[in-house]
Amino acid sequence: LIDTGSEDEPGIPGAIMSRERNKTVRDTIRVDNYDDFAEKIVMEGGKMLTEKMEIPVGGFRGSFQDTEGNIFDIIGS
């Protein structure tokens, strides 16, 4: 996981997945509330690709596709 910010400036938390795994870079975005964000994605025309999955370090993860075909994951509580 990465965070583009610093203590003094806000940034965007996320991750970059290995190209060997998926042949493309897949962005992962950390959100405050998984359910709220997932609902917003679908309401705006995105598609849920996987069911909500619990992750061992706490929180949930899921994959989505936006209206332009980009695939991304979200992680949140």
Image (spheres, rainbow, N blue to C red):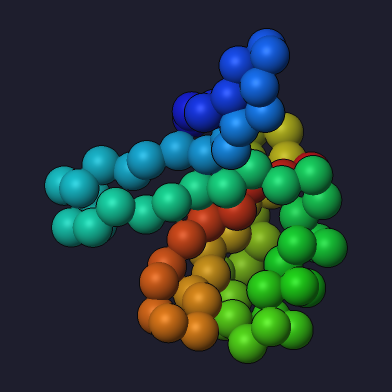
**Residue at position x 49%, y 75% in the image:** 65
Whether residue 76 is situated above or below residue 44 in the rendered picture? above
**Residue at position x 59%, y 59% in the image:** 62
- Front residue of 50/2: it is 2
Residue 37: percent from the left, percent from the top? 75, 62
Give the quarter of the image for residue 59: top right
Q: Left or right of 24: which side holds 31?
A: right
**Residue at position x 50%, y 48% in the image:** 28
Q: Quadrant of the C terminus?
A: top right
**Residue at position x 60%, y 16% in the image:** 6
- Front residue of 45/47: it is 45
Residue 25: percent from the left, percent from the top? 29, 52
* Total marks in image: 0
Q: Left or right of 49: which side holds 31?
A: right
Give the quarter of the image for residue 48: bottom right
Give the quarter of the image for residue 43: bottom right
- Front residue of 44/23: it is 44
Residue 32: percent from the left, percent from the top? 79, 44
Whether residue 69 is situated above or below residue 52 in the rendered picture? below
